[in-house]
Amino acid sequence: MKKILSLLIFGLLLTSCNKAEKQAQQDEEVITQYISDHNLNATATGSGLYFVITEPGTGASCNSSSTVTVDYKGYFTNSTIFDESNSTGITFNLGGVIPGWTEGIPYFKEGGSGTLLVPSALGYGSQATGGIPANSVLIFDVALLDVL
């Protein structure tokens, strides 16, 4: 009985890993196609995240636990906007946002701007959230206005 239970658990883990790997591959294809279609000079981080620095900024640097103010626009690869701040931005701690922002925003210095191309695993994953479908690749134009 223990052997059967172990095999079932192993099978579930294997299936789960395969789904995550397939989704990561699909996201990578979507992101690299978007980069190609929009002629972007993007840098891959190794986690699936890509970023483009339009303006590097000259101010303070931040880290994954910093509180920052960011002006942003979030949209899907078809250019449909799903969220955006006003020009004064929003203030938040990077520890409390999607992993793609926690990892990506620190690539900019205060005053910097660019684009984050976020795979679903670093966004909202396999759960639909507030009008964002499950397994969505997300694009964010960001400007780091302040590091607090």
Image (cartoon, helix red, strand yellow):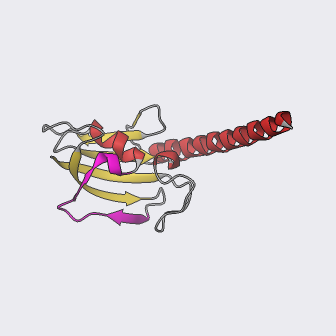
As for residue 94 lying within the magenta part, the answer is: yes
Residue at the limit of the structure toward the bottom, as seen here: 131
Report which quarter residue 3 is drawn in.
top right
- On the picture, is 116 further left or further right than 127? left
Q: Nearer the viewer, residue 20 or 27?
A: 20
Residue at image x 60%, y 40%?
Answer: 25
Query: 40 or 44, which lies in front?
Result: 44
Residue stretch rendered in magenta on the structure: 80-97
Residue at 55% across, 45% down: 27
The x, y position of residue 129, in whole percent, is 49, 63
Task: State left or right for residue 48 relative to residue 84.
Answer: right
Q: Is residue 141 within the magenta segment?
A: no
> x, y percentage for residue 74?
37, 58
Residue 49 location in percent, x, y?
44, 40
User: Compared with residue 12, is residue 127 higher up or lower down, i.e. above or below?
Assistant: below
What is the number of callouts on the image?
0
Looking at the image, residue 18 sits to the left or right of residue 38; the answer is: right
Residue 135 in picture, x, y percent from top left: 56, 54
Q: Residue at x 46, y 31 (%)?
A: 46
Position of the N terminus, as image quadrant, is: top right
Q: Residue furthest left?
A: 59
x 80%, y 39%: residue? 5
